[in-house]
Structure formats: C-alpha cells, structure tokens
Image (cartoon, rainbow, N blue to C red):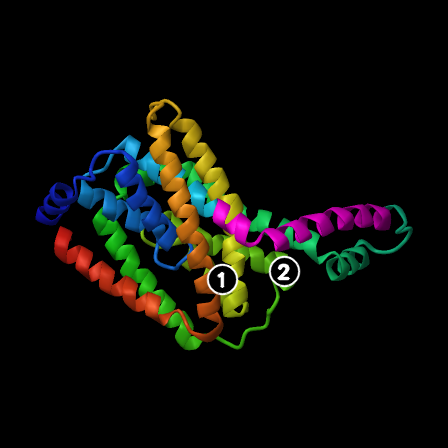
Amino acid sequence: MLGRNLIAESYRMNEWGPGLATILGIVEGLTEFLPVSSTGHLILVGHMLGFEGDLAASAEISIQLGAILAVIAYERQKLMSMIGQAGREQQDIFTMIRARGTTPWSTVLKTSWATHKNLWFLLGLGLAFLPAAGIGFLTHSWIKNHLFTPQTVAASSIIGGFIILAVEARRDQARIHQLEQVSLASAFWIGLAQCASLLPGMSRSGSTIIGGLLVGLDRKVATEYSFFLALPTLIVATCYQMWKSRDVFRQEDYLALGIGMFVSFVVAWLVIAAFLTFVKRHTLRPFAYYRILMGIVVFYIFGF
C-alpha cells in the first residue's frame, strides 16, 4: 500500500490521460510478446498507480491494439504472401476434389498437406485459437473479478518461471524449423497451452512458446508462431472488450487511447525485432529468472 501511494503521488499518473496512456503503452509494448505476461505487468502498474476499475481494464486491453498492429506491420510481407498463396491453394484443393475420382480421401489429404502448406498453416492457426477463445469467453468475467490481483500475478509468474526452466532443461532436439511445417495436431496442442495464459501473470507469449517447444518447434519458430497466433487471439479479445466498453470512454478519452496505442506499436515493433534475434542464440532462462524474481518482489510488496 505504501509503495502504491508513493508512486501515485510522486508521478501523479493515477488519472486517465496522455501521461498514463504513455506509461501503459510502454508496458504493453515491452511485455506483450515476451514470455513475462503483459496482463500481469499492467495489473501491477495499475494497482501501484491507483488506476483500477472498468476504465482501467478497458484502457489496458484497448491499448493492445497497437501491439497487434506492430505484429501485422513487422510480418506484413510474410502475412501477405501466406494469405495470397493460401487463396490459390484453396482453388487448387477444389480442383483436386472434383478430379479425385476413386482416389482415397486419405491420399487427397496427404497430397494436399504436402503441397498446400500455407492454407494448412492458416487453418492450424484457427484451430490453435479455439481452445483459449472458448474457455476465455466462458470464464473471463470470473477471472477478471477474482484473479486480477497482484498475488495471482506473483504466483503465476513464479510458476511460469519454473516451467520455462524445466522445459529448457529437458527439451529434445527440435524437429520443426519452418512455420509451414507446423501440423494441425501441433497447432492444437499449442492452442491448449495458450489456455494457461488466461491466468493473469502466466503470459500468452510464454505459454504458446513453451507449447511450441514441447511439440518439437525450434525456439525461433515457436516464437514466431506465438506472434502469428497472437493476431486472432488479441484481435478478437480487443474488439470484444472495446465493444463492451463503448459506454465507458468519453469522447476526450480517445486522444489518450490513441497515444497509448501509438506508443505500444512503436515499442512492440522494437521488441519483436530484438526478441527474434535473441532466441536464435539464447534460451529463455533469463526470462524465467526475471519472472521468479518479480514474483518474489511482488509478494514482498503486496503480501500473500
């Protein structure tokens, strides 16, 4: 409580406006795509600054839009290529089906998997999106009302840190070195892993990267897959929250929202580029140590 009061009084940022939006944009951009939980950090920052309640929750989720746009902008060439080729592959599949004759469906599917990789990759993303979307839709209100606390963030952060250390310690040799090689089964398991991120502090990025490592993706592919899976997940979550919060924001609030989104976009772009370079050469252990230390500090400040 003392730490919260001191920060709020020192910086006078506990009222919604451009200054607070900038802080939230920086926090969101820094943490959204790293395995450290952006939601957890935003909860902690909001709690320490005294910025809580419906307006805070709506602002924090809405500012995510900047980070989403950063992924789209950073991966725009690959995205456009995949979508364009997937469209052509879809037409090719229809042609194969019409001309299959007595060819077994298993053969058609096997041939399609080998030749229509972009289409199957996008279908896999949709499949991976579904588990967390369904469970999140059913449980979001309860989680928001009962688990959006510093103590939950601290516990999840520590548990997630030890999970990262365990996976990095016993991980088998990676088998998948390209995004297009991610099968529907692997996509589904990664989607199940993403469900862990519904707990504040567990990290959507961390959960999906760890899920990817466990099904045989190399570290860079697992990280990039996490970025792509963020698109449907965060777009749906952000749009849904913004629609629910349409009566929360006043007209003058949108300037601050725009500033927060812009800051989040710029910071997230830089983080995406740096993180992809980092995982080519290093493990995720530094993030695990950070999570464990952060959880201990949060418990020390806010109690158990």
Residue 286 is labelled as none
Residue at coordinates 74% horizontally, 56% vertically from top-left?
116
Residue 250 position, x and y percent, is 33, 23
Q: Secondary structure at mark 2?
A: loop
For the stretch drawn in magenta, the main secondary structure is helix
Q: Is residue 55 visible?
A: yes
Decide which of tag 1 and tag 2 comes sooner along the chain.
2
Nearest the eye: 31 or 111:
31
Looking at numbered disc 2 in the image, what kind of residue is underneath it?
Ser
Count of marks overlaid on the render: 2
Residue at coordinates 81% horizontally, 56% vertically from top-left?
108
Residue 280 colored in magenta in the image: no
Residue 36 relative to residue 73: left or right: left
Q: Quadrant of residue 77?
A: bottom right
Within 10 angstroms of label 2, few (less than 14), some, or many (20 or more) residues?
A: some
Residue at coordinates 40% horizontally, 28% vertically from top-left?
244
Nearest the eye: 50 or 177:
50
Within 10 angstroms of label 1, few (less than 14), some, or many (20 or more) residues?
A: many
Residue 82 colored in magenta in the image: yes
Looking at numbered disc 1 in the image, what kind of residue is underneath it?
Thr
Q: Which residues are the magenta region?
A: 69-97
Q: Is residue 210 visible?
A: no
Residue 67 position, x and y percent, is 44, 47
Q: Secondary structure at mark 1?
A: helix
Q: What residue is shown with label 1?
A: 223
Residue 123 position, x and y percent, is 64, 49
Tell me the distance, in whole angstroms, between the alpha carbons under discs 1 and 2. Answer: 16 Å
Residue 195 relative to residue 10: left or right: right
**Is 156 situated above or below 256?**
below
Residue 183 is labelled as 2
Q: Quadrant of residue 157?
A: bottom left
Residue 169 relative to residue 158: left or right: right
